[in-house]
C-alpha cells in the first residue's frame, strides 16, 4: 500500500497525463494506485441545467472511487439515488445516463439533500468524511430547505466541497438562489469545468 503522499502524487501524475493527451477519467481510474483518503461522499446533480457536465463529473467520481477505498456516489435531480454500485471504470461515459433515473430532469437540490440527511447521514457522515457536491446550484426548490440540509451536512462532516462547472468562468458570481443558500456551509467553492480544475481538488481530498 503506498503512502498517502505517494498515492496522491501518482493520481496527480495520472491527471496530468490525461490533461496532456486528452485521455479520459476512466482510463485514469484503471492506472492509478490505491490512495488513502478520508471517506468521500459525492452528490452529483444530473438535472437538465447540468446536462453538459454531468457525465464528466460522474466520471470524476468513478475515477476517485476506483482509487479511494471508502467512496460513495449519489445522483440527484428531483430525487436522490445511490449509484455507487451502478458505476464502474469499464463503463463508457456515454452509458452513465442509463444508470441514473430521470437524467436531465428537474432540480430540487434542497429536497434531495434532505433525503440524504434523513436516509444516509447517520451511516456515512462523520469527522473523517469529505462531502463533494457537484452542481451548478440552479435550484427550483425552497432556499430555506437547501440551507437547512447543508447546515446538517456540514455539522456532521470533516469538510464540504462544492464543485461548480460555472465557476470556471472568471466572470462567475454565485448569485443563484441555491448557491447563496448553500455557501455559508461550504468550505471550498471550486470550478469543475475541465480536468485541470479537477486536479486542483485532489489535495483537499487527501489532506
Image (tube, rainbow, N blue to C red):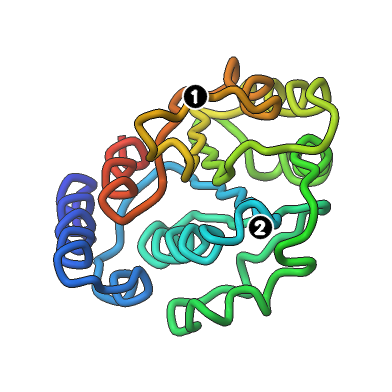
Residue found 26% across the figure and 73% down from its top: 23
- Describe the element under mark 1 as helix, strand or loop: loop
Disc 1 + disc 2, Cβ < 8 Å: no
Determine which residue is flagged by label 1.
Answer: 173
Dot 1: few (<14), some (14–19), or many (≥20) neighbours within 10 Å?
Answer: few
Question: How far separated are the C-alphas under marks 1 and 2?
Answer: 21 Å
Q: Residues within 10 Å of mark 2 (few under 14, many from 20)?
A: many
- Sequence-first tag of 1 and 2: 2
Position in image of residue 134 (x %, y %): 55, 46
126 w.r.t. 22: above or below: above
Identify the residue at image location x=48%, y=57%. Answer: 57
The image quadrant where one finds the C terminus is: top left
The percent coordinates of residue 58 (x first, y second) are 52, 62
Vertically, is 206 above or below 171?
below
Q: Residue furthest front?
A: 171
- Which numbered disc, 1 or 2, marks the residue closer to the eye? 1
Q: Residue at x 45, y 29 (%)?
A: 172
Considering depth in this image, is 76 or 156 the residue closer to the camera? 76
Residue in front for this viewpoint, 25 or 52: 52
In-image side of 116 versus 196 (left or right): right
Residue on which disc 2 sits = 46
Q: Quadrant of residue 191?
A: top left
**Quarter of the image that includes the N terminus:** bottom left
Amino acid at each position: 500500500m503506498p503512502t498517502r503522499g505517494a498515492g496522491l502524487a501518482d493520481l496527480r501524475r495520472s491527471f496530468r497525463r490525461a490533461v496532456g493527451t486528452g485521455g479520459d477519467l476512466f482510463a485514469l481510474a484503471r492506472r492509478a494506485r490505491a490512495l488513502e483518503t478520508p471517506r468521500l461522499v459525492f452528490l452529483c446533480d444530473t438535472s437538465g441545467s447540468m446536462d453538459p457536465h454531468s457525465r464528466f463529473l460522474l466520471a470524476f467520481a468513478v475515477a476517485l472511487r476506483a482509487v479511494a477505498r471508502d467512496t460513495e456516489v449519489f445522483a440527484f435531480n428531483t430525487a436522490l439515488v445511490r449509484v455507487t454500485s451502478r458505476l464502474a471504470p469499464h463503463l463508457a461515459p456515454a452509458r452513465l445516463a442509463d444508470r441514473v433515473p430521470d437524467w436531465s430532469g428537474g432540480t430540487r437540490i434542497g429536497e434531495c439533500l434532505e433525503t440524504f440527511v434523513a436516509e444516509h447521514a447517520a451511516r456515512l457522515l462523520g469527522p473523517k468524511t469529505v462531502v463533494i457536491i457537484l452542481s451548478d446550484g440552479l435550484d427550483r426548490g425552497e432556499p430555506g430547505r437547501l440551507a437547512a440540509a447543508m447546515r446538517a451536512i456540514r455539522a456532521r462532516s470533516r469538510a464540504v466541497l462544492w464543485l461548480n462547472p460555472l465557476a470556471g468562468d472568471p466572470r462567475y458570481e454565485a448569485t443563484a438562489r441555491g448557491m447563496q443558500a448553500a455557501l455559508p456551509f461550504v468550505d471550498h467553492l471550486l470550478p469543475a469545468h475541465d480536468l485541470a480544475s479537477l486536479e486542483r481538488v485532489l489535495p483537499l481530498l487527501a489532506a
